[in-house]
Amino acid sequence: MTSLTCIAMLLVGVCLAQSVSQLIDKKLIEYASDRYGNSVVKKLHTWGETVVAQQPNSEQQKLQVLNVFFNEQLRFRDDIDIWKQEDYWATPLEAFAQGAADCEDYVIAKYFSLVQAGIAEEKLRIMYVKALELNQAHMVLAYYATPRSQPLILDNLIDQIKPAGKRRDLSPVYSFNASGLWLERMRGNSIKVGNPNRLNRWTDLLVRMKSQGLEAWFKPPQLGN
């Protein structure tokens, strides 16, 4: 290995470390350590390192890696068992602390992670659906390669990412991201009806994320600078 190669690898390592420290910053570490202990702080560092490592990769790779990462890191449990509430949208920190998540918690963590990995927010939508085989409400993350593309569905129920047309077990109801709210009238057709501030649980989630030191995850990264 040449000295130039060593220097280049060192510089890459320094840049990655700086990027991770921007996401897993002092405020977040102090909050997590005081409230949950060092074991959760380690999970946060693993999360940050995994996300930053995906930044140079293709969007398909980012989707695959981060979808499986959360499906493996968190075990599924209902909100009533975790939080003693029927419907609670946990922050990623809260999910890591519990080591468990309901469907919306997986989606929230994947959404913010993929944005930080470099996927544009407008390509991602948190989608409320009905899981037909389970006969219950469910939430998934939809990825649109282009505005007119059939979305790919990221789901905690399965690791495989499939086009929406091949998920006949799901019936979409509404979707949203940081900038919009849509009614899903049929597959491949949606109508924008406003902004996500109409969703009380979403606004409450953002407030809690900010108070916990997760505010850095709101702003897309400046890649390539």
Image (spheres, rainbow, N blue to C red):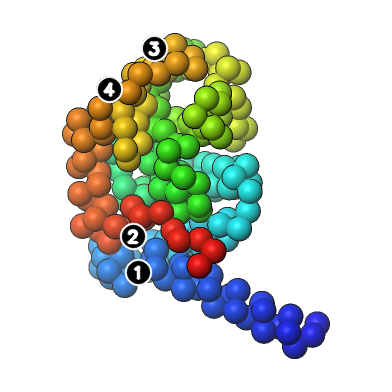
Reading the image, the residue beneath label 4 is 193
Amino acid carrying label 1: it is Asp
Instruction: For mark 4, give the secondary structure.
Output: strand
Instruction: For mark 1, give the secondary structure.
Output: loop
Reading the image, the residue beneath label 1 is 25
User: Of circles 4 and 2, which is in front?
Assistant: 4
Amino acid carrying label 3: it is Arg
User: Of circles 4 and 3, which is in front?
Assistant: 4
Residue 133 in the image: state x and y as whole percent.
49, 13
Reading the image, the residue beneath label 2 is 216
Relative depth, front residue between 55 and 70: 55
Residue extending farthest to the bottom is 3
Which dot marks residue 117? Answer: none
Asked if marks 1 and 2 touch (Cβ < 8 Å), the reply is yes
User: Of circles 3 and 1, which is in front?
Assistant: 3
Amino acid carrying label 4: it is Val
Disc 4 or 1, which lies upstream in sequence? 1
Reading the image, the residue beneath label 3 is 185
Disc 3 or 2, which lies upstream in sequence? 3
- Report the Cα–Cα distance between label 4 and label 2: 28 Å
**Residue under the image location 58 percent in, 17 percent down:** 165
